[in-house]
Image: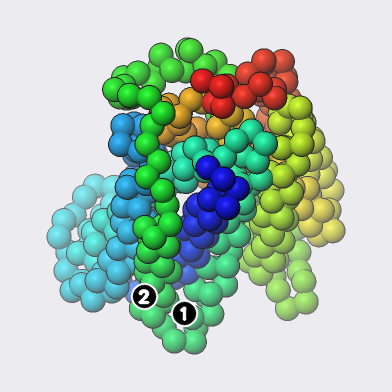
Amino acid sequence: MGEYDVRAVSLAVVGGVFFGGIATGVAFPTLPLLDDLLGITAVMLGLVLAANRIARLVMNTPAGSIIDRVGARTPMIVGLFTQALAPFGYVVGLHTPPVTVASLPVLGEVSAPGVVFVLARTMWGVGSAFVFIGAFAVVTHVTTADNRGKWIGYVRGGQSLGFPTGLVVGGVMTDLVGIQEAFLVAGACALVAGVVAAAVLPDVTPDHDSGGGLRDVPALLRRRPVVLPIGVGNFTLQLLWGGVLLTTLAKYAEAFAFEIGPLEAAGVAGVVMGGGVLVTGGVTLWAGQRSDELGNRALLTVPSFLALVVGFGLIALVPALPALVVGILLAGAGVGAGAPALLTILGDVTPGDELGRLGGVYNTMGDVGLSLGPLVAIPAVETAGYRATYLFCAGLVAACLLVVSLPLLWSPASDTARVADSD
């Protein structure tokens, strides 16, 4: 493809993930209020909030296999429109009669609105699996080693910046016009993403006749062992950033009584994390372009992990608001530098007919980290304390220098002789 086509297609993908992120963010401020609005139990609310992540975790690898078989265009467009249906499902849930449909040992009383919201969130998770893997496959197909980092950086940046944009829009709309209207805006944003993708995305088909399915994934990993450290790196970044920090930051701010003017723990956590997310998005855009200029993209993982080590160490050892701000910004910069580098290396070393399945493995490991983080973070800070927990996180990132950066730096498949462009 020429540069103009690459730009048009890649920007369409960026637009899709950005508007999808906005739609996710618009709905998110209202979802934790559903227990009061719908009369569902706290456990049921937790299931509603986790349903999309569970569904995506299950669907990542099957979605990748489908993309390898039929190409990325149709599955990604279907995924975008599937996401768009979910917020309208939320609206249906708001108007569903609050009758009890079951009484289960762990969940307690399960109401009809709760079931509708779980189904809608599950639909979102299924759609997002096709969108994320499809976006990776499309951009990798239309780019080369000379510009792949730039455009994957834009895609990751769109993902990073769309969600906080939606958080602001959703919070403001909920307060000014209402929850239902916020959900409708979320659905409209997701529909826009689907329409743009349907109009612009090319019919990207596998480079070879790919007859393999899920059962071939272990063989693919054995044939391309460099994928394992890439996945471990993604798992660690998602575990610590999206899992541990997002889960414990408000409690950390509360424990040390941090305040910013009238803002207390929750407000401080929101402002600080918002700054960290913005830094992540900005560094992601820079790191993608920078990786195209390097002889080995894995070089970017070294400062990435070091920034996270220093960030967690600072938060652990200096319980003061300025240290927290600097630590979060360093951690955000580390994630922004490392995530696009790892994803671009995966695109470099993966042939076109394997992009879906190995992209699914990559996303699965990240989702495992996101899901595991909240499960271990809260018990850890309550039993071992914040200092020990954050120092352990710093040590975990430091270990990535050995188990991720070192193998990637030494791997011939990670240097400028890109496997995906030569196969």
Quadrant hosting residue 267? bottom right
Count of numbered circles in the view = 2
Around disc 1, counting alpha carbons within 10 Å, would you say few (fewer than 14), some (14 to 19), or many (20 or more)? some
Tell me the distance, in whole angstroms, between the alpha carbons under discs 1 and 2.
Answer: 11 Å
Figure quadrant of residue 143: top right
Name the residue beneath numbered marker 2.
184
Residue wearing tag 1: 174
Quadrant hosting residue 94: bottom left
Q: How is the image coloured?
A: rainbow
Q: Nearer the viewer, mark 1 or mark 2?
A: 2
Name the residue rendered at 31%, 32% in the picture: 69
Q: Amino acid at mark 2?
A: Leu
Picture coordinates of residue 155, whole percent (x, y)? 57, 50
Residue 227 tag number: none
- SS for tag 2? helix
In the picture provided, is 26 more to the left or to the right than 266? left
Nearest to the observer: residue 418 or residue 63: 418
Residue 414 seen in the current view:
yes
The foreground one among 107 and 3 is 3
Residue 165 placement (x, y as % from top left): 58, 67
Is 361 rendered above or below residue 254?
above
Which amino acid, by three-letter code, is at mark 1? Thr
